[in-house]
Amino acid sequence: MSQQQPTTDVSIDDIPVDIVNMQSGDVNPTDVPEEIASITRGLAGEQPPTNPLVVLKVARWWYIHGKGGTDPAFRWAIEWARHLATDTPGDVEQFDEFLEYLVTIGFADERHELR
């Protein structure tokens, strides 16, 4: 049997997608599901995730709920997944932009708190 979901809430994997707030660009850290927030913080940390599928799951969430293809968290997740797949260095400027973005939206007060 399938469960009915409200038309404004769609599930991909176990992470709900709020159709109304898609690509709003206004991300509040309290609205980020814990799994996504945890992995996002991990991407900013000293030992980021090494499973590209997990990283792509986070990229998808930020793409849908952030600023689409221009969202810094989405862009860094894609860059990190590329790094994992090709074993080439990541873009330092893109990483810096990602850290600044996390501070701007309230994931931390200062960049050094994320590392």
Image (spheres, rainbow, N blue to C red):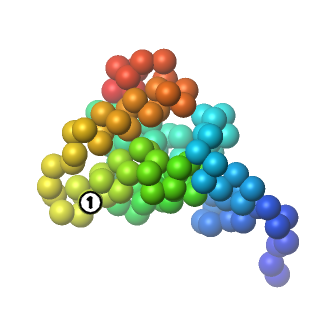
Residue 33, image x and y in percent?
A: 62, 45
Instruction: Residue type at mark 1: give it.
Output: Arg
Res. 63 in view: yes
Q: Which residue is mark 1?
A: 82
- What's the residue at 46%, 48% (across, down)? 71
Q: Which SS class for mark 1? A: helix
Residue 16, image x and y in percent?
A: 68, 58
> Which of the image's four quarters has the C terminus?
top left
Residue 52, image x and y in percent?
A: 35, 60
Vertical placement of residue 36 versus 6, above or below: above
Vertical placement of residue 101 versus 79, above or below: above
In the displayed structure image, the side of residue 81 where residue 72 appears, left or right:
right
Residue count near mark 1 (Cα–Cα under 10 Å), binned few <14, some 14–19, many ≥20:
some
- What's the residue at 31%, 58% (across, down)? 81
- What's the residue at 63%, 35% (across, down)? 28
In the displayed structure image, the side of residue 97 where residue 92 appears, left or right:
left
Outermost residue toward the left? Answer: 88
